[in-house]
Image (cartoon, grey):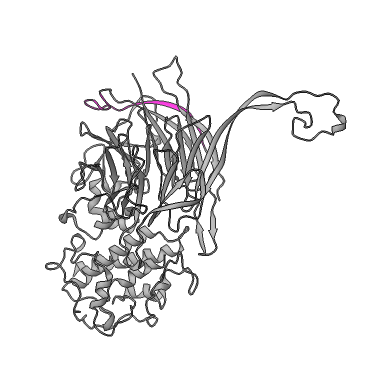
Amino acid sequence: MVPFHFIQTWYQIIQEQVKKKGDWFQNTSLEITLTLMATLQSDIISTVEFNHSGELLATGDKGGRVVIFQQEQENKIQSHSRGEYNVYSTFQSHEPEFDYLKSLEIEEKINKIRWLPQKNAAQFLLSTNDKTIKLWKISERDKRPEGYNLKEEDGRYRDPTTVTTLRVPVFRPMDLMVEASPRRIFANAHTYHINSISINSDYETYLSADDLRINLWHLEITDRSFNIVDIKPANMEELTEVITAAEFHPNSCNTFVYSSSKGTIRLCDMRASALCDRHSKLFEEPEDPSNRSFFSEIISSISDVKFSHSGRYMMTRDYLSVKIWDLNMENRPVETYQVHEYLRSKLCSLYENDCIFDKFECCWNGSDSVVMTGSYNNFFRMFDRNTKRDITLEASRENNKPRTVLKPRKVCASGKRKKDEISVDSLDFNKKILHTAWHPKENIIAVATTNNLYIFQDKVN
Amino acid sequence: MEFKLEAHRIVSISLGKIYNSRGQRGGIKLHKNLLVSLVLRSARQVYLSDPCPGLYLAGSPAPPQPGEPAAGGGGPAGCQALGASPLKKPRRHLEEQPAGAAAEEEEEMETGNVANLISIFGSSFSGLLRKSPGGGREEAEGEESGPEAAEPGQICCDKAVLRDMNPWSTAIVAF
């Protein structure tokens, strides 16, 4: 195991600007400030998640570690610039395990992190690997007791016979220490690999989903969970689809959705029955027969599903596109955005090099007006639902000079390549952005390339 | 003809992926292998429905099998089109098999490349997904109706030409 360490850490605020004709985020001109945080060289980032206030940003990696960044409190004097994100806490969430019964190694890679809303001084998050979910408490300690009678300051016990006077220990300030401790461990409930966790709006229960089953947990109870979806066929030979993602509705605590490898989304109501095998709604778009190929099934498999903050819409990501669904309309999405349609003719090569199995995530901005997802060559894409404009940006360290205009990027699918365009064949498919997150309230985004986390924020004028 | 080549190439690649997934850390990924098996199924149908003579090692042409789902229209356009839907339930195929094929048998393709892969896998198809020959199965769930062992190295036989996709789906059971 490569020990965790920061190769380089720099806290550099670089003002960037994205010049775009017309307005972008609600009539403010978009300026992107690039803040480059810690570079995690030793492991691949596997999940990124802002907490409910946006003050904290958690990342999980392939080595089972969680790193939490905290936004500096806004400087009142410099109110035009938002606080930058600094490392707040680092801990080892999961370790590799071995299942002796099945002779299987269980990866420690963190698949998902979900924050609980803050109820007291401490922060809580759920992190999961393939098999086990853990509830972590992250708390601050900035005082320590001093002046014990029976202990020295370094903790060694004093000989009681040497104690001649008594004193009352007092709390004295100390350097801030952030501690993470596992409060609950939810284990042994999943035979297959966990792909999703989602906290219910009741803030008491949450779901965890693997390839074939979804379980409902109570945050306080670790020794049992309820199975609410089971799509395992009686005969495994008849298996045709698996669950790829699941999420609770943001407002209705009885409603959740799960997506499948066949490109369908099922909405289930837990009030209808204990086992939600029969969906309340089935969202499916008929396949375009002209696009049929060997790989149609693979590219229609949904890799991520996210409800809008309003709860009225949900967004799905498949290999080539992002689709927005109105919960009231099941037969087709209301909006479809092509992320990298130029890859459709390359599916065979992408199958060979396994890129076609990449699972891209997607996210909404705080007002549900813009959606974002990643692509290859360290590109990420944003789609404005109102103006129907889209933009391609690149997360790279080459553009980090102060005041550099961050150019929108363009991929040339075929034909004559214009200046500054990139041809499809020169895209680097090893540089992929699978995980992105958007601050719940502000225009701050976190974008994870393979080994680096980029935090971009726009400047408020 | 080129459709057959393309389909054959995809079958080889897919078999390789299934084979490699055995050694992956964290166990076999059910989702990925399901997708690969679907591609395999599609490629196989294209391969078999292409009217051009196939690439048979033994030289004998494949007899058309009754009950095999007919390819839609004429020759499919290679990677871009498919014959019958690949999502048919495998059970139905089994029932339509000609007599004498009661037990599921290993899927065999009559091409050298694939034959090599098959002989690597060993005599039994489910050996594909065992970590070690005769060792425990990864995530064995439920009964796996294991395919009958064919003779090691047997690569071309008339009766095995149009075996249905069941053996590939059987791979999933080993998960």
Residue A223 located left or right of residue A290:
right
Looking at the rendering, the stretch of residues picked out in magenta corresponds to: A8-26
Residue B78 quadrant: bottom left
Query: Quadrant where the N terminus of chain B lies?
Result: bottom left
Q: Residue A57 magenta-drawn?
A: no
Residue A158 quadrant: top right
Q: Closest to the observer: A168 or A375?
A: A168
Query: Quadrant where the C terminus of chain B lies?
Result: bottom left
Residue A458 visible somewhere in the drawing: yes
Residue A64 visible somewhere in the drawing: no
B66 shown above or below B16: below
Main SS class of the magenta portion in the image:
loop
A91 shown above or below B140: above
Q: Position of residue A93 (x, y in %)?
A: 53, 45
Total residue callouts: 0
Q: Position of residue A418 (x, y in %)?
A: 21, 39
